[in-house]
Amino acid sequence: MQPVYYVIDTATRTQVPATVRPATQNDFLKTEVEQWQTSWLSKFIQEDTLEKYALEISGTQELIGFGAYRDVPDGILVAVEYIESAPNSNPTLTCSRKFRGIGAALLAFGIQLSIDYGYGGTIYLKAKTSRLREHYIQDFGAIPFSHVDPFMLLIDGAAAKSLFSRFLEEE
């Protein structure tokens, strides 16, 4: 079994193969030129300890998302520090998304990193909004794990396996 990422084309309702690859400075520049919600040239995102990846459509190399991840050996998990969809697919920026499932693919990639590091697929993230928090809990099985900050979520065990399995195919 190997991970094969995809997103859903909202016009045709079909799966479109997607590729996750290390992000480049040219990718980050596009976030300013194309007016993404966040500049990926920001000091926070450019922090050296973050691993930054781009999600693109496999056939066209259209950039559709980014993920910034942090290896947390003390916590035995990978922190998903930030994920974002391209403006034409970001529900905060448009009512009519070109693709959906970008967040799921980027979270599943975080689970892949966690597995690769030997952490069994455990990821941590902080939801940006109440709506996203509920989405992560209902659709991905995330659990709140902080008494101080209800937006801090953990995806672990069966929930991580279920999400990651959506993107697994036989070799």
Image: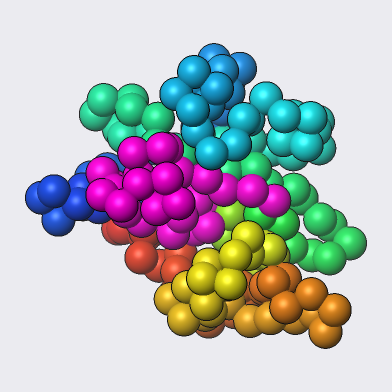
Q: Nearer the viewer, residue 7 or 127?
A: 127
Residue 2 appears in view: no
- In percent of width and height, residue 133 lies at 57, 72
Residue 78 highlighted magenta (yes or no): no
Q: Relative to 155, is 62 above or below?
A: above
Residue 105 lies in the magenta-colored region: yes
Query: Which x, y percent locates residue 56?
Result: 38, 34
In the shown orientation, is residue 149 left or right of residue 101?
A: right
Residue at 33% x, 27% y: name it: 62
Residue 124 drawn at (x, y percent): 69, 65
Asked whether the viewer can see residue 34, the reply is yes
Magenta residue span: 81-109
- Rendered image quadrant of residue 163: bottom left
Q: At x 58% / y 77%, what residue is drawn? A: 142
Give the side of residue 137 with respect to residue 15, left or right: right
Please tell me which residue lies in front, 20 or 137.
Answer: 137
The residue at the far right in this view is 74
Rendered residue at 62%/75% (across/down): 156
